[in-house]
Amino acid sequence: MTDSPIHDAVVERQTPRADFSIDQCWSEYTADEHAVWDLLYARQLEILADRAAPEFLNGLKKLELSRSGIPDLNRLNPALKAMTGWEIVMVPHLVPDDVFFTHLANRRFPAGRFIRRRNQLDYLQEPDVFHDIFGHVPMLANPIFADYMQAYGQGGLRALALGTLKNLARLYWYTVEFGLINSADGLRIYGAGIVSSFGESQYALEDKTPNRIKFSLERIMQTEYEIDEYQKTYFVINDYEQLFDATQQDFGPIYDRLKAQSQTFGTADVIKQDDLI
Ligand code: HBI
Ligand code: FE
């Protein structure tokens, strides 16, 4: 973590509000910043057509994210709000956990304003506007997934109070960021960390190395993750109801059980209860 964050003058001159939000100032993106979005967009679309979940591709289409350039929130927010009641707020960089969860619990998704530079198309330490909007927003146009994300925010606030954030953060990681779904046409990607990555979109589905294991809430909550390499394990859902339904129970007893067991699985472990795909 030695690289300095990307310099964005429009971010730096602003004082964030109490909820860490800032203005997008869309008219101030440079032509080159819009061109980087277009480049990333074209590159992803080509490989995602038969790899991304139909709900993701449908969200892209309904929100007209194929328009050229970085999306203008003044256009995107009314469209998204009409579909599922969600909106996007711009933030300068990663925000504290409680701030992040409070936004989600209120159906607001915090997105970075800056966009990566041309020499960093493939790896970034902090989420930029491409990861956050291209990766996350299409699924927020899906009503069940939209409800799941809000439930996650509410659960995050509870987990913070209970000291169990580590368990809950793993659920976000292995679903919202790196989730796969068993669709009628086979395995597809819905996780934002995968769909926004050129290399991992191919690796997650086609490489022989990683484990692909059927979704299990408690298994996920016990599984470590690494943030700076391709995943060694992906968890596969059958449908989005399965995700939402998993959040409609009191996690309190689950956290108690996990605490009592104090069992943690490594990123590549396979255990006998796993249902491998
Ligand atoms: N802030 N902007 C931003 N984006 C995130 O994805 C994010 C964050 N703060 C905290 C956070 N994620 C994670 O700690 C939680 O998902 C657990
Ligand atoms: Fe993300």
Image (tube, rainbow, N blue to C red):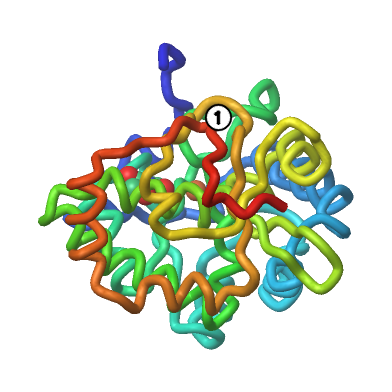
- Give x and y (percent) for residue 276: 67, 50
In the visual, does 265 lie left or right of 183? left
Task: Please tell me in which quadrant of the rendered image residue 55 appears.
Answer: bottom right
Task: Mark 1: give few (<14), some (14-19) or many (20+) Cα within 10 Å.
Answer: some
Q: Amino acid at mark 1?
A: Leu
To which residue does mark 1 refer? 124
Vertical order, 2 against 183 (above or below)? above
Whether residue 8 is visible? no
Task: Please tell me in which quadrant of the rendered image residue 76 appears.
Answer: bottom right
Task: Please tell me in which quadrant of the rendered image residue 155 appears.
Answer: bottom left
In the visual, does 237 lie left or right of 64? left
Q: How many marks?
A: 1
Depth check: give the residue in front, 206 or 102: 206
Residue under the point 31% across and 64% down:
153
Whether residue 167 is visible? yes
In the visual, does 197 lie left or right of 145? right
- Give x and y (percent) for residue 100: 30, 55
Depth check: give the residue in front, 211 or 5: 211
- Give x and y (percent) for residue 190: 65, 59
Vertical order, 166 against 160 (above or below)? above
Vertical order, 193 against 228 (above or below)? below
Q: Residue furthest left?
A: 161
- Give x and y (percent) for residue 151: 35, 72
Residue under the point 87% across and 58% down:
50
